[in-house]
Image (spheres, rainbow, N blue to C red):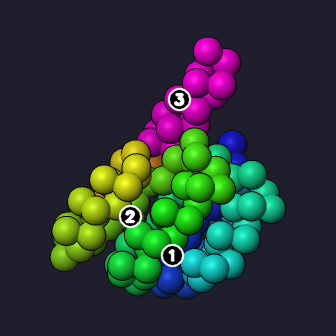
Amino acid sequence: MKIMIVESDTEFREHLVQRLASEGLSSLDSGNLNEAEQLVKKHKVQAIVLGLSGFGRSSLSFMKNISTIVPDLKVILINRHNKIPLSIEAMNLGACAEIPVPVDIAVLVKTLQSATAENQQQKDG
């Protein structure tokens, strides 16, 4: 499973990468939306964990752009309670799940596994 963490807060992003690694999941990461878009193209990422808070409305443009590059890419939002309207817009653009902060790694791992398994079933079916 190819995962990318896209989060503007470097410390938080690195912590997520380490926690996912401790669960046996390796991931790419980026703190920049333009860089993340290039990585999606280059590495055939299956799922993105997208932190909404630091990117604001730019995260919505990012989602629109990557959905044209990889239509079946799964986006899982990491959201703080003060960004609910933004989260609703992101879900309307196709995000498949939302995980609140503080992130429960077990829930994130299960959500990633479910999202990528769904992709595989669609390809196999």
Q: Which residues are magenta?
A: 109-125
Residue for badge 1: 7
Q: 41 and 19: which one is in front?
A: 41
Amino acid at pointer 2: Ile
**Circles 1 and 3 in contact, beta carbons < 8 Å:** no
Q: CA distance from mark 2 to mark 1?
A: 9 Å
Residue 118's x, y, as percent? 53, 29
Q: Which mark is residue 122?
A: none
Residue 26's x, y, as percent? 70, 55
Quarter of the picture holding the N terminus: top right
Residue 67's x, y, as percent? 55, 55
**Residue 117 visible:** no
Q: Residues within 10 Å of mark 3 (few under 14, many from 20)?
A: some
**Circles 2 and 1 in contact, beta carbons < 8 Å:** yes
State the residue at coordinates (58%, 46%): 71
Q: 61 and 53: which one is in front?
A: 61
Amino acid at pointer 3: Glu
Dominant SS in magenta: helix
State the residue at coordinates (67%, 18%): 124
Residue for badge 2: 78
- Mark nearest the camera among 1 and 3 is 3
Q: Is residue 48 above or below residue 7?
A: above
Q: CA distance from mark 1 to mark 3?
A: 24 Å
Quick one: label 2 or label 1, which is nearer the N terminus? 1
State the residue at coordinates (73%, 67%): 39
Q: 12 and 4: which one is in front?
A: 4
**Circles 2 and 3 in contact, beta carbons < 8 Å:** no
Quick one: label 1 or label 3, which is nearer the N terminus? 1
Q: Secondary structure at mark 2?
A: strand
Quick one: label 2 or label 3, which is nearer the N terminus? 2
**Residue 73 visible:** yes
